[in-house]
């Protein structure tokens, strides 16, 4: 298995065209591997729970100058904060992904107000004659968090990282509103799910009562209906 030192050495000599092409190849392969895993997890969740936690997936590889200090990245955009931790757990349970580090900027936001959940993972890339462990950063955030982060990036890019104080304060205020919105939307979703679950229970109960009424009309006071397993069978059918 090729060591991380060899990959890092290739990174440091990125001026060499061949070395740079190799790194790009590895990072692209790593993004494909991780992207496929995430799509399968999303499909499985839909199959089991009839719900997709991932709204969409973004991938990125930075420029030669910046990639020396950065790596390939995958960004997962979710609807609710609960999805973030659910996905993080699912990713951590993948046997062929090694979680190297975690930074929870949701429970511990940056001073700017930035919120996101970062996972640094290592994924094996199986080549024809070797296996190369390649690092990928996975960022998981809600739609609202991603909107705020995108705006912050554009603002600080324009000011080259030195935005006026009043703009920084306004961004922090917006971050608070984003957090409140996420909390409200999560509470609303939980209330909706509880309502749907109660409606399902009510529907099952109505179906059971209807089936029992039909059986009574058909069987009347027949002793077989009272003493046999007919009523139990009715319950099995409607549930």
Image (cartoon, helix red, strand yellow):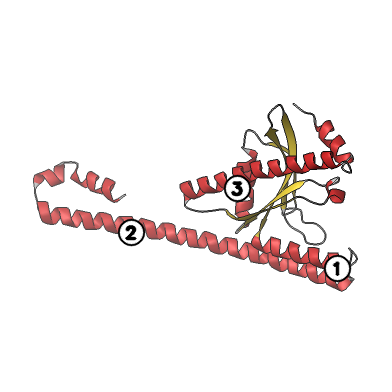
Write down the residue under mark 1.
158
Q: Quadrant of the N terminus?
A: top right
**Mark in the foreground, 2 or 1:** 1
Nearer-the-camera pick, 160 or 51 = 160
**Mark in the foreground, 2 or 3:** 3
Q: Residues within 10 Å of mark 3 (few under 14, many from 20)?
A: few
Residue placed farthest to the front in the image?
17
Report x, y in % for residue 157.
Answer: 84, 64
Which numbered disc flags the more N-terminal residue, 2 or 1? 1
Write down the residue under mark 2.
203
Label drawn at residue 86: 3
Q: Tell me the distance, in whole angstroms, between the alpha carbons under discs 2 and 3.
A: 30 Å
Contact between marks 3 and 1 (CB within 8 A): the answer is no
Q: Tell me the distance, in whole angstroms, between the alpha carbons under discs 3 and 1.
A: 35 Å
The relative height of residue 138 versus residue 195 in the rendered view (above or below) is above
Q: Residues within 10 Å of mark 2 (few under 14, many from 20)?
A: some
Contact between marks 2 and 1 (CB within 8 A): the answer is no
Asked which secondary structure carries label 3, the reply is: helix
């Amino acid at each position: 298995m090729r060591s991380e030192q060899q990959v890092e050495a290739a990174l440091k000599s990125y001026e060499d065209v061949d070395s740079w092409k190799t790194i790009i190849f590895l990072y692209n392969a790593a993004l494909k591997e991780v992207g496929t895993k995430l799509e399968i997890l999303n499909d499985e969740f839909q199959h089991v729970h009839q719900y997709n936690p991932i709204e969409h997936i973004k991938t990125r590889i930075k420029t030669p100058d910046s990639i020396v200090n950065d790596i390939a990245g995958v960004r997962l955009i979710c609807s609710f904060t609960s999805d973030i931790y659910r996905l993080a757990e699912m990713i951590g349970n993948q046997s062929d992904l090694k979680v190297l580090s975690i930074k929870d900027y949701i429970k511990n936001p940056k001073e700017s107000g930035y919120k996101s959940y970062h996972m640094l993972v290592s994924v094996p890339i199986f080549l024809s004659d070797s296996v190369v462990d390649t690092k990928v950063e996975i960022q998981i955030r809600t739609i609202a968090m991603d909107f705020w982060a995108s705006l912050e990036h554009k603002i600080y890019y324009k000011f080259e990282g030195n935005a006026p104080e009043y703009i920084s304060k306004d961004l922090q205020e917006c971050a608070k509103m984003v957090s409140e919105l996420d909390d409200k939307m999560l509470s609303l979703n939980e209330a909706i799910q509880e309502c749907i679950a109660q409606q399902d229970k009510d529907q099952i109960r109505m179906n059971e009562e209807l089936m029992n009424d039909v059986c009574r009309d058909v069987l009347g006071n027949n002793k077989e209906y009272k003493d046999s397993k007919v009523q139990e069978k009715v319950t099995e059918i409607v549930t």
